Image (cartoon, grey):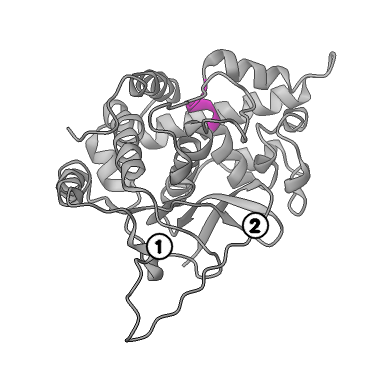
Amino acid sequence: MKKISYFLIGCAIALGFTACSSDDEPKQPSIFANDLKTDSADFDRWLRKNYMDPYNIHIIYRYQDDETDQKYNVIPAKMENVKALAKMMKHIWIDAYKEVVGADFIKSYSPRIFQYIGSAEYRSDGAMVLGTAEGGLKITLFRVNAMDIDNIFIDSISPFPNSAAVPIDMNYWFFHTMHHEFLHILQQTKSYPMEFNTVSAGKYHANDWINVKDEEAPLEGFVTGYASGEAREDMAEIYATYVTHTPEAWEKVLKAGEKGSDKTGREAIEKKLEIIKKYMKESWGFELDDLRTVVLRRSHEVLEMDLRTLD
């Protein structure tokens, strides 16, 4: 199954676990047992009501060896963080598309599985995996345990978010990634205009995009360094950046594409955005600006939500 990964430059770490047991020794609790309590049954019922029954979406939050990449050492997600993320994801992501396009859109095209992992995955080259999408069916989100559910931070105003911000930026680590990967599913379902590929043809960094800084990428016509890798990622990055940021933040990205009188970078981004808007309208039946308005409003509403209780 093809796996599409979305990366961030990071410092690589190695985690190792050792264990021993015998019939004569008392068994110690496994770190993979998670902190599941008796109320997990209530949460499972909540997931069925809000995810499974209406959209046929399954959330994996208990650690399962066969659902993770065995090349990496990862840890389970904390139960309280799992609940909070599930509530936020429904409000900001699922319900946003439901409001703009309708419930059938999510039911038809959403990934069937979301998996929550407590820690990050680090590649041998030092790249941190923000999320993975497998064949349009499953999206895995990492660093769930890094959330501070009593101090939620959703940065929609910074054109180049700080990946090291504390508390972590939910847009950067989760919602941007989800919109990015969802756009890949839509790309695979209905072909996007090949005109998009020609706008920045010859400028993509197929082998060294990892060295392109986000702040400098707009001068070359890209909204992030990752977008400079290839056209499909370019499109997904523009889409995700646009819908999760305010008009003022987007304008700052465009301004970063100017150098004196040279507006080549800005013009390339603007042209690609117009192609995306046309694609979403003609192929999927909604205005991208409408989605952004709803996403931003719902992101603000989340800050007032009680993320420790189920409703």
Q: Is residue 265 left or right of residue 243?
A: right
Residue 33 occupies which quadrant of the picture?
bottom left
Q: Position of residue 199 (x, y in %)?
A: 69, 36
Q: Quadrant of the C terminus?
A: top left
Rendered image: mark on residue 253:
none
Q: Secondary structure at mark 2?
A: loop
Asked if 44 appears above or below 99 in the picture, the reply is below
Residue 298 occupies which quadrant of the picture?
top left
- Out of 12 and 214, give the one closest to the viewer: 12
Q: Position of residue 189 (x, y in %)?
A: 41, 50
**Residue drawn at the location 39% of the way across and 18% of the way down:** 300
Count numbered badges in the picture. 2
- Out of 48 and 245, give the one closest to the viewer: 48
The nearer-to-camera label among 2 and 1 is 1
Q: Position of residue 200 (x, y in %)?
A: 72, 38
The residue at which mark 2 appears reads as 13
**Given the image, on which type of amino acid does mark 1 rest?**
Ile
Q: Is residue 104 left or right of residue 190?
A: left
Graded by Cα atoms within 10 Å as few (under 14), some (14 to 19) or many (20 or more), the crowding at tag 1 reads few
Rendered image: mark on residue 31:
1
Main secondary structure of the magenta stretch: helix
Residue range of the region highlighted in magenta in the rendering? 241-245
Graded by Cα atoms within 10 Å as few (under 14), some (14 to 19) or many (20 or more), the crowding at tag 2 reads few
